[in-house]
Image (cartoon, rainbow, N blue to C red):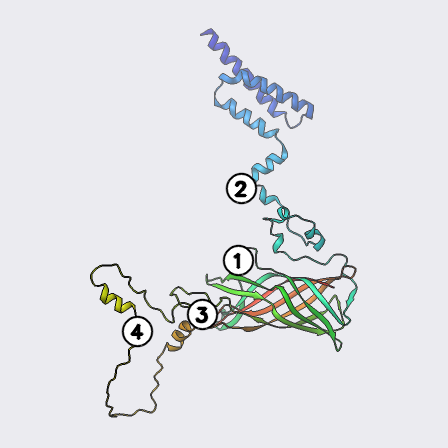
Amino acid sequence: GVRRARRSRGARASEELARSLLVDHRNQTPVAKMKAAVLAAVLGSAAAFAPAPARRGQVAMAAEGGNPMQKVAAAALAAGLGLSGLTAPANAITKDEINSLTYLQVKGTGLANRCAEAAGEGAGEIGINGKKQLVDMCLEPKQFLVEEEVAKKNGDVVKDFVKTKLMTRQTYTLDGVSGTISNEGGKIKFTEEDGIDYAATTVQLPGGERVPFLFTVKELVASGSGSSLKVGTQFGGDFKVPSYRTGLFLDPKGRGMTTGYDMAVALPGLQNGQEGDAELFNENNKKFDVIPGKIEFEVTKVNVELDLAQEGDAELFNENNKKFDVIPGKIEFEVTKVNVEDGEVSGVFVSKQPSDTDLGSKVPKTVLLKGIWYGRIE
């Protein structure tokens, strides 16, 4: 009994001393803090027989004297953010900086989907004399808008471009586009010839409807005033938007343009080697029979205004008869920065093009894209 009393009194004394150290901990010098931490660690062994409050005091002291970065990380983890939420926002990047990175440094960062920006101050101009090449052209959309019917507060329904949510991963940038740029009659003319000039993209409207489209500048012919590229130069033109689907694509009912069914039908049965195969054989192995017949006609009524086309026939016809649509689009470029030494130009663009038609069975929506572009003159 005496030993238990002495042990409990020792634990209480150690606990009171640890509390007093915690009270003055913030006002102590670093050396004093270290001494206090060592003393508290020693006292912790003596307070091992103390109840739970002594352990809570030790945890409080450890949190008070911990590393500041550990405190920030702990707070971020507590908020469900993790250390990834502490990264800095992305800034503009130059072509030289991109080229200096290895594959492993780029992998998983999203840099492969970004367009570079012309280096330097951005002043000066690049003259276009004769024919030159615009290479390494990159187009990165920043905003995706789709034209929809929107109800106003007064009840009127008007067409307007609404913001959308991008559903495609970071593979929607056009890169490596090249072509001839020339000066014809005091006007700049650019003709797109090669490169990764299309990217399948999907966006989602506020109501949940998804709109697929093929972001492209295929066969672009753009022109603008002036004989040089400088800040403020504008040029634009038309391009072709191929079908989002190709001829080998089959819809959920097995219908396609170059393959598949002509219309929605069921699959034929298979022979199983059992009784009745002869009849099934004749059903599955079709042949073209030509058998004579005879018919007699008599006219009993005439209606010259009869229209055999019923409601919905046009829609069903479009669903069954697939076609590869090529619809025009339009794009406008503006130069905002020039690097005369390296022949670099960069700026902004606005593109207007149709969405997917599902091989001709749907009416396309109008998609408006705004973003940045980069190119280099050779």
Residue labelled with disc 3: 258
Label 4 vs label 1, nearer the camera: 4
Helix, strand or loop status at disc 4: loop
Q: CA distance from mark 3 to mark 1?
A: 28 Å
Q: Earlier in the sequence, mark 2 or mark 4?
A: 2
Q: Amino acid at mark 2?
A: Ala
Q: Earlier in the sequence, mark 3 or mark 1?
A: 1
Front one among 38 and 295: 295
Label 1 vs label 2, nearer the camera: 1
CB-based contact (under 8 Å), mark 3 and mark 1: no
Front one among 3 and 135: 135
Point out residue 101 in the picture as x, y percentages from the top left corner.
67, 48
Point out residue 19 in the picture as x, y percentages from the top left corner.
57, 22
**Numbered label attached to residue 168:** 1
Dot 4: few (<14), some (14–19), or many (≥20) neighbours within 10 Å? few
Label 3 vs label 2, nearer the camera: 3
**Numbered label attached to residue 287:** 4
